Image (spheres, rainbow, N blue to C red):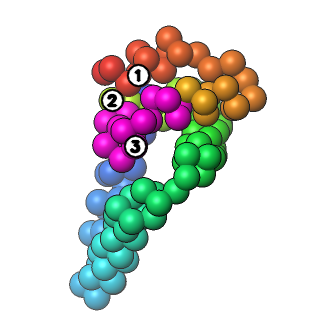
Amino acid sequence: MSLEELSKKIEKEYQEYLSNLTSAEKARHLKEIQEFDNSMNKFWDEEYPKMSLEEKKKYWLAGTHKGMRTQGEALGDEYSEFSKKWYDFAKKHEPNFDEIFDSVTKNLGFEFDWEEYNKRIKK
C-alpha cells in the first residue's frame, strides 16, 4: 500500500469515526484537536526559536530517526516521510534547515540516500 493510499484509508476511517460520535463527543474531540494544534504552534513559535543549534540538531535527529524507522516498519519505505510539504514546513520554521539536516544525516547511524531524499522533497 502506498503512502497516498494509506492516507486516503485513514481519512475515510476518521470520517466514519466522527460520524459515529454524539454531538458532545464530537465537540470534545474537536476541542482536543484544537488544543493540540495550539500547543504545536506554541512550540514552533515560542520554544523552538529559543533552542541552541545543538538542541535543534538533536531535535531533528530524533524526529528523523524515529520517522524513518516508523515509516520503514509500516510501509517498507524509510524515505516516505519526506515530501515537498514536509520540507517546506521544515524550511519555514528553520531557515538553516539544510545545514542542520546535513549534520543530522551524518549521525543517523546508516548511510543516508541523498538522491532518494532529494527526489521526495521536490515532488
Find residue 120 and name its label.
Answer: 1
Residue 116 coordinates in the image, percent (x, y): 50, 15
Distance from the alpha carbon under mark 2 to that under mark 3: 15 Å
Q: Is residue 119 above or below residue 51?
A: above
Which mark sits nearer the N-terminus, 1 or 3? 3
The answer to which of 85 and 71 lies nearer the viewer is 85
At label 1, counting other C-alpha atoms closer than 10 Å, the crowd grade (few under 14, some 14-19, many 20 or more) is some
Residue type of the residue flagged with mark 3: Glu
Residue type of the residue flagged with mark 1: Arg
Which mark sits nearer the N-terminus, 2 or 1? 2
Residue type of the residue flagged with mark 2: Lys
Q: What element does badge 3 sit on?
A: loop
Q: Is residue 88 above or below residue 13?
A: above
Q: What element does badge 1 sit on?
A: helix
Residue 71 coordinates in the image, percent (x, y): 57, 36
Dot in front, 1 or 3: 3
Dot in front, 2 or 3: 3
- Disc 2 and disc 1 in contact, CB within 8 angstroms: yes
- Disc 2 and disc 3 in contact, CB within 8 angstroms: no
Q: Residue 106's quadrant in the figure? A: top right
